[in-house]
Image (cartoon, rainbow, N blue to C red):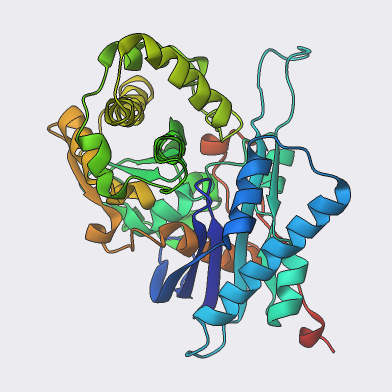
Amino acid sequence: MTRVIGLISGTSVDGIDAALVDVVGSQTDLKVQLVAGQTFPYPANLRSQILSVCSGSALSMAELAELDDAIAQEFATAALTIQAEYDKAELIGSHGQTVYHRPARKVQKDSADAFMGYSLQLGRGALIAELTGITTVSNFRSADIAAGGQGAPLVSIVDACLLAEPNLSLCIQNLGGIGNVTYLPATGKWENKDESEISTISTLGDGISGWDTGPANSLLDLAVQHFSDGTKTCDEGGAWAASGTPCQALVDYWLQQEFFRQAPPKSTGRELFGVDYFDRCLVEAQGYNLSPADVLATLTELTVASIVHSYQTFLPAMPDRVLLCGGGSHNLYLKRRLQSQLHPVQVLTTSEAGLNVDFKEAIAFAVLAAWRVRGIPGNLPQVTGARAPVLLGEINSCWHSWA
């Protein structure tokens, strides 16, 4: 057993999700026990700065360094706090805070339009290791990107190890700022295979697929902040949107955006579905005389429609069940609309399948960190588009561990 702290702040920039996790086994026999989970909100000024950078605001190198340090310090504080009442963790897996993501573009060989992806997560692992005295694995995306992948989604193989069902195909739908899906065929969690039969993580992940589906909470949060003059940051439970009426004509128009039609592997972020995109949505909504509630309902419907369209277009078959996770899983209106549009597919949450809905991503990066130090590759090439399975993350040891 390895006690690991998983840390992540997603594209919603709500705060740092910290999970203290006991990790047992490797892949086919993986088991996790959530000892403690807590979300640590960013200080308001730091969150504002992160969102500004994510929206494209310029920074000097000195300002970038200060922001990187400030985020790392918040992550280190979260790690120290989450384990304060428990035995000390042996390892930290820190995803950090994504501030820029440029997906890889794959076109014809030798085309000038092809380029490698790039993704920047702040909150450097070396500083977290020094501040906590715990070896820290960080910068998880870079190795997959160097191998030609998108660097996202990265948690699909952990989803497979923890959530696959013998007789049901599943979609694990994360609803953070950006949505992503993992499709799990009914593999039976490989119950009839010995560990020795599974030579690579690609074999383990046979039949699994995954990709970013588009905006989940990013546009909704921007709309709430806009219509509330900054007094609110999110639509609690989707109540505001539920009081409005979606404009289907706008949803149909927005679905023509190139990303939704692009075949996987694919990933996205606030670079596409951020402030500029939201501002265009507001302009395009003006001709329909929509109330703020109507706009929120329409943006919610876009999230729903993009997910349903994605399943219908890119899955081999519709799943038997959808398991939601992330902050958007608490949006009851969004969940109801998904259930309505996906009927008769059952829509539940990962908590109902035994994996905490709020800390699933943090748990996943705890697992990926444990795999990294054991030399187990953590990406699925069929999901990210990488050329091969690779070790994910850089290991940062602190002087405490060797002095």
The quadrant the C terminus occupies is bottom right
Horizontal arrangement in the rendering, residue 208 relative to residue 292 (left or right)? right
Residue at x 50% of width, y 79% of height: 82
On the image, the x and y values in percent for residue 103 come to 64, 31
Dividing the picture into quarters, in which one does residue 317 lie? top left
Frontmost residue, 115 versus 307: 307
On the image, the x and y values in percent for residue 28 come to 42, 61
Does residue 395 appear in the picture of this structure? no
On the image, the x and y values in percent for residue 4 come to 54, 75
Q: Is residue 393 above or below residue 115?
A: below
On the image, the x and y values in percent for residue 110 come to 78, 14
Q: Is residue 219 above or below residue 20?
A: above
Horizontal arrangement in the rendering, residue 368 relative to residue 133 (left or right)? left
Residue at x 29% of width, y 55% of height: 350
Horizontal arrangement in the rendering, residue 157 relative to residue 57 (left or right)? left
Considering every residue shown, the one lying at the far left of the view is 344
Does residue 212 appear in the picture of this structure? yes
Residue at x 45% of width, y 37% of height: 210
Dividing the picture into quarters, in which one does residue 359 lie? bottom left
Residue at x 38% of width, y 23% of height: 314
Frontmost residue, 356 versus 277: 277
The total of numbered circles placed on residues is 0
